Image (cartoon, rainbow, N blue to C red):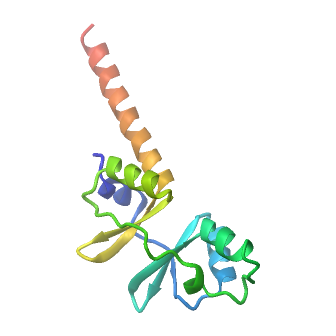
Amino acid sequence: MNRVADIISRKGVSAIAVSPDTPVIEALQIMAEKNIGSVLIMDGGEYVGIITERDYSRKVILKGKNSHDTKVAEIMSTDEPAVKPSDTLEHCMQLMTEKNIRYLPVFENEMLAGVISMSDVVKQTILLQQETINHLDSYIHSNR
């Protein structure tokens, strides 16, 4: 129980997406309303990229662009590595650390299955550790 599929089954497959021509301000409003840090960019049902709060701060604010006039296609990240439901949490942590990213799109049979965040990976790791602690505690107390 240390795979991407476990995270997806716990949090669900629904990922928030917008089209490439969506103004950045709208994507930010969606992120604020949903309390999320990224939005997927989908074009005709196909994944084309992701926009994160980091993209906004580095590619809009620091470059003096306007959030109302800039489209998400102009600032989205398109080169993020993707993972599969069968990939391990360790693999995800390694990718996120090496690439200094916080979000990974998940694909199953070349179809988008969702997105996971560093927070999701950490939460799942904590759940697994708590499960191990509970099993050990149960084992210790059953042998007394």
Return the x and y of residue 29 as percentages of the image width and height. Answer: 68, 76
Return the x and y of residue 7 as percentages of the image width and height. Answer: 37, 55
Report the front residue among 135 and 71. Answer: 71
Left or right of residue 80: residue 113: left
Quarter location, residue 74: bottom right
Report the front residue among 41 and 30. Answer: 41
Above or below, 35 against 19 in this view is above
Return the x and y of residue 69 as percentages of the image width and height. Answer: 71, 90
Left or right of residue 15: residue 7: left
Above or below, 123 against 101 in this view is above
**Residue at screen point 27% across, 19% down:** 139
Above or below, 77 against 21 in this view is above
Return the x and y of residue 63 as percentages of the image width and height. Answer: 72, 76
Give the residue at the far top of this rendering. 144
Image quadrant in which the C terminus is located: top left
Asked if one can make out residue 34 in the rendered structure from this viewpoint, the answer is no
**Residue at screen point 46% across, 72% down:** 15
